[in-house]
Amino acid sequence: MAIVELRHVGKRYPGSESLAVSDFNLVTKDGEFVVLVGPSGCGKTTTMRMIAGLEDHTEGDIFIGGVNVNGVAPRDRDIAMVFQSYALYPHMTVRENLGFSLKLKGHPKADVQKRVETVARILGIDKLLQRKPRELSGGQRQRVALGRAIVRQPKVFLMDEPLSNLDAKLRVGMRAEIIKLHRTLGVTTFYVTHDQTEAMTMGQRVVVLRDGRAQQIDTPNQLYQQPANRFVAGFIGTPAMNFLTATLGDGRAAGQGFSLSLDAAALRAAGNNQTLCVGVRPEHLHLAHDDASSRLTGTVEVVEPLGAVTLIQARVGGATLTAQIPPIERVSMGDTVTLSCDADRLYLFDPKTESLLKGITLQAAP
């Protein structure tokens, strides 16, 4: 186990005017599970490859276990990587794949066998040790790839979208397996994904990246409740947050097709701004009652029944809003609906900087 620290780390590719990763700063806790998430091209895989030493960073310093690893070869950093592709040796059995790195390092045969069998039991592949990769399912191959990293007993695990080749159901199962595995092993882990659901369910802390810059580094709950800016707010949460451009006046934020009541905290946060970007999550929108103080009126364009909830998309003024309503509510495409949201569930963002002016604080259950 080890603490990993990145100080002002940056990466510029030859011939590029801009940095692929810019001024990245992070100090992990010992044994922490950190997820790097963001859209394609945001720098998450480049950051992980710099930690591994597979990419040279052009700025800053990287420390693993208190040791500066600038210029240290990947094989000497005591890290283990799990890639998007399983990268198993097709001519070797599962046992041979698991023990290959230990064999290369000259570990005694008895030690290799003990480690391989211990890891195989942990991952539930002990009955597959004599099979070759072509005889395994996708999930089994992914377990072997994980096992090959675990058997080395490294200081740090680096996982680059390891579940992207699996189907949806198997991904959910493997997410749970990796979480349990991390709890058992307690090894500092970096996990790269473009899937914000994966990030929120797996990470103890999550780094949200955009255009090579860390937008926010925080716990999943804080990212959801107190996003640093409009990008994080729109990226974290499924379905995504709705955004409206509103004009302030008489304690309300209004625009074409909507008028929202603001509470005292929102008015203080708005300050002297005459226009604001207002955010509201789909689960905080509901069909309005007659006495609703906030009203958004629009035409239903899409209805998605999901069993436990129904999602509707309604055109309100110039924006399309998504609302999550109970399945008992009967709504059809083409209907005119009026939605409402409680004032304390609104987010406010600066229209120029897009930084958060006001979020919400959800109280923990007693």
Image: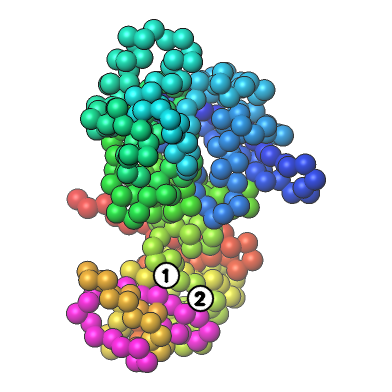
User: Which is nearer the N-term, disc 2 or disc 1?
Assistant: 2
- The location of residue 15, given as percent across then percent down, is 80, 45
Give the residue displayed 72% in from the left and 34% down from the top.
Answer: 58
Q: Which residue is mark 1?
A: 280
Front residue of 343/227: it is 227
* Label 2 SS: strand
Amino acid at dot 1: Val
Amino acid at dot 2: Leu
Circle 2/circle 1 CB separation < 8 Å: yes
Front residue of 142/203: it is 142
Give the number of callouts. 2
Q: Which mark is residue 224?
A: none
State the CA–CA distance, disc 2 to disc 1.
9 Å
Which stretch is magenta? 314-336
Q: Dot 1: within a 10 Å radius of its alpha carbon, few (fewer than 14), some, or many (20 or more) residues?
A: many
The reply to whether residue 186 is in sight is: no
Indicate whether residue 334 is drawn in magenta.
Answer: yes
Give the residue displayed 39% in from the left and 7% down from the top.
Answer: 108
* Label 1 SS: strand
